[in-house]
Amino acid sequence: MSRFKKWAEREYSAKQRVIALLFEGIFFATVIPFFLATASYHLDMWFNFPRFTYGWINFIVAVPLIVTGLALAAWSVWVQFTLGRGTPSPMMPTRRLVVEGPYAYCRNPMSLGMIVFYLGVVVWVGSVSAAGLTLTFSALLIMYDKLIEEKELEERFASEYLEYKRRTPFLIPRLWRKKEVKH
């Protein structure tokens, strides 16, 4: 955790953060989906898995998932960049705890957005292997969020994060807010 804390102590310029976001965006929004489509095609052929391609139905189901997932992830990144003065990268973390925007509804909206996006890619390519790869990636991402990122946030933001964690769901958004009962 000390490495994360050391990274968090350094302030990065907007230009440095934009450059980092460009590389991260290219990787997560193009390289991983390309790998997912290419690898799944070869895995499906190798294992003789059937594909679930139904023409326009795949397109009609996939596009809303892809657009919604990317929009949620982009909104999350934007809020981290503007309000938190950081990036999703552990090496350029936010300078303050971000609890506004999509973070008011769940603690990991960017992860949720990327999982929805990759599920859209799965439907688009219609591949059993792509579904398996996406579920594996999603499980690893959730484990990272839960086991590493949460501990780092607890260390950096202490009781402020613990209170946020208490009132905000981990991954599945609460689209309504509970009224706090004061005694």
Image: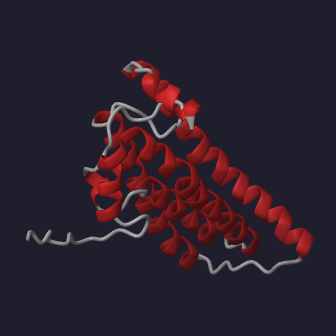
Which residue is at the front of the view, 10 or 172? 10
Residue 107, percent across and down? 39, 57
**Where does the image place residue 80, in percent across and percent down from the top left?**
36, 40
Q: Nearest the camera: 87 or 127?
A: 87
In this view, the residue in front, 110 or 116, is 110
Name above or below for residue 139 compared with residue 22: below
Residue 78 lies, with reference to residue 142, above or below; the image says above
Residue 51 picture quarter: bottom right
Colouring used for the render: secondary structure
In the rendered image, the residue lying farthest to the left is: 183
Q: Residue at x 40, y 32 (%)?
A: 86
Answer with left or right where residue 181 lies relative to residue 143.
Answer: left
Query: Residue at image x 29%, y 64%?
Result: 167
- Placement of the N terminus among the 4 image quadrants: top right
Q: Is residue 51 above or below residue 15?
A: below
Given the current orientation, which residue lies at the most extreme right position? Answer: 46
> What residue do we see at 58% from left, 46% from top?
28
In the picture, measured across the screen, residue 15 lies left or right of residue 45, that is left
| Quadrant of the frame with the C terminus | bottom left
Q: How many marks?
A: 0
Q: Position of residue 18 (x, y in %)?
A: 44, 27
User: Residue 143: x percent and y percent?
Assistant: 60, 59
Q: Residue furthest front?
A: 183
Q: Image point 69% across, 80% down: which residue?
A: 52
